Amino acid sequence: MTKRVAVITTGECERLALGPSLHRVFPEAEFEMLPKADSFTSADLSRPTPISRTKTPREVQKLARKIVAAVEDSPPPDLVLAVDDLELINEAHPGLVVEHLRDAVAEHLRAIASDRPMATGLKLADRVRARCSFHLLAPMVESYFFGEPAALTRAGSTRASQVDPTIIDVEAFVTTDADYLARPHSVLTGSWAKPRRERHPKLYLKFLCDPTDQRARSYIETKSGCAALATLDWRAVHATQHHVRFARSMFVDLAHGLDVPPPFLGDTHPATSRFSTAAVLRNL
């Protein structure tokens, strides 16, 4: 019987194209895209959040509720996969990011347990732990396009990337492209000439699509971004076994849940591959 995987994303490109992209690797599964959630990683999560009376930001609470709600109905999906971008602002502390999400899920399950019969609450917590997981794309989905040169072309690139994915781990993206870095910083909306752009894969992709910086919409996530992601060659992206550990954690998790061999060999990231000690979600 075909297993059903429900996917919750925080980006529109991922909502439109991640399902088809994953299906290319796991053709035995059916990927169902759920409504998009708000991202909680655009702010520095190492800092206090005064707008919230609890220890978790409001956006992560909403995502936690969506994850739990996805398995409340019967029959639930076989797996629920929630995905968010790590973002550059949180790259130094991915463990803190996943702890926010894990704690929010646990907090929501405790609230449910206090309002329902104990057996119902325990059954739901067991279902979440067996079927649900949370993964990060680092620092954002466009990173992985640099692991397959043809994906950059599908995304609209008009010149060759100076990032060699056999040397640079695209999850720790950096470019030394002199033409890209030479332009003074711009305050114009849509410009790729922003501070710290050497670490920003989406801005570099926009440069590759329009080196003149004259077209604010030279790269459109919901069009050319989807074209790159939907048919992404994940095998090429995973070619170096100690690179893309966040992505590999997601594929290993899906493989375990679908009861198939992991499609790519190599290292996983400890922040999102706590499979043997997971207490709340499948991987956390």
Image (spheres, grey):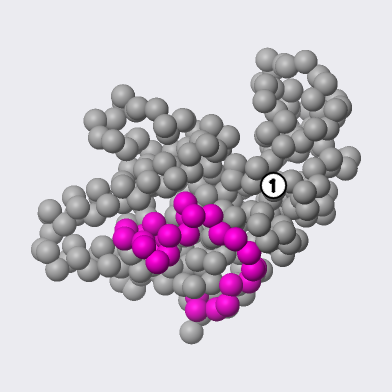
Q: Would you identify the image quadrant in which residue 142 lies?
A: top right
Does the magenta segment cover residue 263? yes
Is 135 left or right of 152, judged from the image as shown?
left
- Name the residue tied to disc 1: 170
> Residue at coordinates 46% horizontally, 72% vertically from top-left?
257
Q: What is the quadrant of residue 163 in the picture?
A: top right
| Above-or-below relation of 64 to 32 | above
Taking 284 as reference, is 235 left or right? right
The residue at the point 49 percent across, 73 percent down is: 256
Residue 116, x across and y down, in percent: 13, 59
Q: Which residues are magenta?
A: 258-284
**Residue 108 counted in the magenta span:** no
User: Closest to the observer: 243 or 62?
Assistant: 243
Residue 97 placement, left or right of 252: left
- Magenta-drawn stretch, dominant element (helix, strand or loop): loop
In percent of the image, x 66 and y 57: which residue is there?
242
Does residue 231 appear in this view? Answer: no
**Residue 9 placed where, x, y %?**
50, 50
Left of 105 or right of it: where is 146?
A: right
* Horizontal and vertical percent position of residue 73: 30, 66
- Name the image quarter holding residue 117: bottom left
Q: Is residue 277 above or below residue 169?
A: below
- Element marked by disc 1: helix
* Count of numbered badges drawn on the protein: 1
